[in-house]
Image: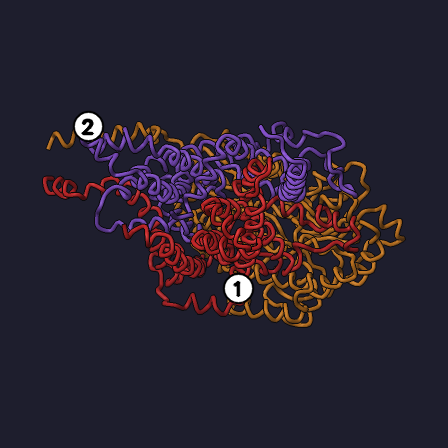
Amino acid sequence: MNRIKRFFGQGNIGYLFVLPAAIYMLLLVGYPIISNFILSFQDVTVMTLNKPHKPFIGIRNYRTLLGDGVLLPSLVNTFVFTVCCIALQFIIGFALALFLGRDFSIARPIRGLLMIPWMIPMTVTALMFKFMFSSNVGILNQFLQACGLIGQPIEWLLQPRLAMLSLIVANTWIGIPFNMILISTGLTTIPPELLEAASIDGANRRQSFFHITLPMLKSVIESVLILGFIYTFKVFDLVFVMTNGGPVNSTHLLSTYSYKLSFTLFKYSQGAATANILFLILFVVSIAYLKFVYDDKETD
Amino acid sequence: MKKWLAIAIVTLAACAVFTGGAFAQSKKTVTIWNYWETPKHQETLARICKDFNASQGKVEVVTKYIPFADFKKQLSIGAAASELPDIVIIDNPDHASYAGMGIFADITDKLASWPDLKQYFAGPLNSCKLDGRLYGIPFGSNCLSLYYNEDMLKAAGVKPPKTWDELKSVALKTTKGNVHGFGISAVQNEEGTFGFLCWLWGSGNTSFQINNPNGIRALALMRDLVKSGAMPKEVINWTQGDTMNQFISGNLAMMVNGPWQVPTMRAQAPNLKWNVVTLPVGAKAASDLGGENFGVVKGDKVDEAVAFLKFAASPAEMKTYINDFGYIASRKDVADGQFANDAVMKVFSAQMASAQPRGPHPRWPEISDALSLAMNESLTGIATPEAAAAKAQKTIDAIVK
Amino acid sequence: MPERKASDRIRNLSLCVLALLAFALLMFPLYWMVVTSLKTEIEIFKVPPTLVPQVLNTDSYFAQLKHGDFNMFQSFKNSFAISSCVMLICLVLAIPASYGIARFRFKGKRLFILSFLVTQMLPVSVLLTPMFIIFKNARLLNTQLSAILADATIGIPFSVLILIGYFASIPKELEDASRIDGCNRFSAFLLIFLPIASPGVIVCTVFSFLYGWGDLAYGMTFLQDQAMRPITAGIFNFMGQYGTKWSYLTAFAVVTIIPVIAIFVFMQKYIISGLTSGAVKG
């Protein structure tokens, strides 16, 4: 008892504060990560689930997955989805931030209201876009037809490429506010004198954007892009509800494919292996993020 | 020592109080999981349980609803966590999977002396078996047949199709404006497999063969119907309920669906003129055997569960509920004369003669996934029937062999 | 106030119009959802579509009350209970943890920050099955506590990381001064740090509630009873049951986002600061 007291007394009292949360996370998150890792090297399917001995099969699950014709496309999909979403969100978000950063009467309230899409449960967003993109009753097709832009309804959710595009549009809609707000905040940290000075020196808008605004926002942009990557890469609900990987497995992401393997096909080990691949990629990116954001904070 | 004993007794007593006096209660509770979502089905099931509970004093049966989309998931995670009910009302092709997983009790010996077993039709009863052992009994059966809109067919001057070729031409002739000639449920899951198998079997194949001229013909039929515009491509997003809604809204001239839709259709579209015929025949007559089985879960309440099964399956009790479900009885003595006054249900009854169960195979979900994928691929034109069949066969062979 | 020049006014006006156009375009999906929920099923299928319901139809909202086959208001209450508890757990655990990390020196501090960061980025599929077994062993399955405990694992790391920033930004002199006044570390925490960090605490409150509200995967997996499930799982199930009955589905969706809109109206500035302080350094 005394030893414990001494331990916490000697500047280690910080542990007392951190431990409850740490233990909670260790139990509910740490343990599952490890158990998932082990599961991915075993052969656990419907047949072996209840047997006490779970055969260890090394990396065979990973090998099987690489050859199953869905995992690799899902991996590619996940990257395509993530990169397209981030690019669109970032460009639109940046443009909106610049636009709403100008001084006019309704700029602030509009910027606030545009936050709403980011807060809505993804299940609802997915339902909404599924409705708007539906081929026969969807407003998008009706609008395009009314404008005479298309003759036949476009099969948004029925063709692989278009379904992926629809998902990207829906997820971009969610992500725009996030990008916009972060960049807006970043913009306010640029001293206005700097831009004024540049314009006195004869720089035009484009020049001062590329030579002052962008460099000043470097760290904000890094954060936005990396965080955007992490949030987008693991998206599950949106795809699960909107296409559930269809048509014909063409829009599966690693997250939805892992869910399908575990909870529709009951190949738990393969599902775990897919989840691990997703986790490993995210882990590497998270470390990169940590380096960017927390490195210099720690040095003081 | 005495002190410890006293503490132990007090603790035990406290536990007994907190567990709701389970020790004092002599009645055993038997829980049934089911996925029937319509209120009518729920009420009827509750009534069966009430009848049983009133008929004896030892067992109390309670029901619990789990949504269909979640059912298999809950069952398999439940198995992993030994969090299972005592009886499961299960989709018949899954029965073997879960028996293989070891969650169901082998009740072959307990029913060996039960005379009623002989009354059951072979198809439904076989779906309760794995390796010749019995893991439950059928609840009730249904199958798929062809619904058609009488006015639309008359307007096009055609009769309900009897062969695949006639199906294609009738479907095309009844396609006009917003109306499509034909629709099925083709979602990429078990429901879609269910909608596709009647064509695969009709071509002369089994559930496990697809990469041969027969299987390719079945896939090509799906593709041709979509290609000609007679069937909307959206069927890949339609559940059976959606298909029925499209039909009663007048957007479809024909659809494939089951008898459980009949009560709803009669209630919701009383003015629509429709009728049912047996499915168009390819190489041979075929339909899907749908319906549920009672599966008895391993554990200490197997005897009580079996007692309930015998009660619910008795001809007297079965007659009180089977029509309300829109099901066809799985036992001959009840099925005979079940629909004496119902022309539509008689068609389904007749169709039962050619209805086959899916699988059965312990890894049916994976096989089913391969089949519905192949159907979706050729239906949407993402792959040719030949390529889709070859791919599906590869998956199935890896599982079956 | 000096009179504005005419050219300024025109500039202001044209920017406003432009902003409103962008706003209308981005918010159209939400508008369309609300409008659809108030249309009759026949009007929804009408070509060309009507922008405003011709016949106001509130049936979609009340039909479920009447028929009782699925009650969205019950699942609304469930979500509310679950999210509130998630919020409490997050605060109780995250406030001390972030305070400890921000104000004390101890070994492995970086490791703690790293772990919180990584857990925030975990995909749900990694956690589902193992968590299920944990909850089963703890006899929590099919109780709302299971969903609450699982949802809190999203909110805790977020809150910790946000609050570290707030606690760290409090000058050391203030702490020293409180020491001189005779406060010990705990009372300093309660009397000085917590009030100063209160905007951060509100941010965490709002976000952990929203995380709980938005969750689908956990609620859907750990709760079997329809009567206990959160509203997101309710919608998902409803989509399976009513397929293409869009008036019902959109009504359900509108009910789901009501609290989100309410939170937005009252908490807007905290949401924005939560988003930014979570990501932007310095």
In this structure image, what is the colour of chain B? Answer: orange
User: Taking C118 as reference, is A132 left or right?
Assistant: right
SS label for mark 2: loop
The chain drawn red is chain what?
A: A
SS label for mark 1: helix
CB under 8 Å between discs 1 and 2? no
Mark linked to residue A76: 1
Mark linked to residue C251: none
**Amino acid type, label 2:** Asp
Chain letter of disc 2 in the image: C
Considering only vertical position in the picture, is C231 above or below B400? above
Image coordinates for residue B169, horizontal then vertical, percent:
83, 60
In this structure image, what is the colour of chain C? Answer: purple
Task: Read off the residue under disc 2.
Answer: C181
Residue A234 seen in this snapshot: no
Image quarter (top left, top right, bottom left or bottom right) of the N terminus of chain A:
top left
Image coordinates for residue A299, horizontal then vertical, percent:
28, 52
Image coordinates for residue C29, horizontal then vertical, percent:
64, 42
Image coordinates for residue A228, horizontal then vertical, percent:
48, 52
Considering only vertical position in the picture, is B1 above or below A279? above
**Amino acid type, label 1:** Val
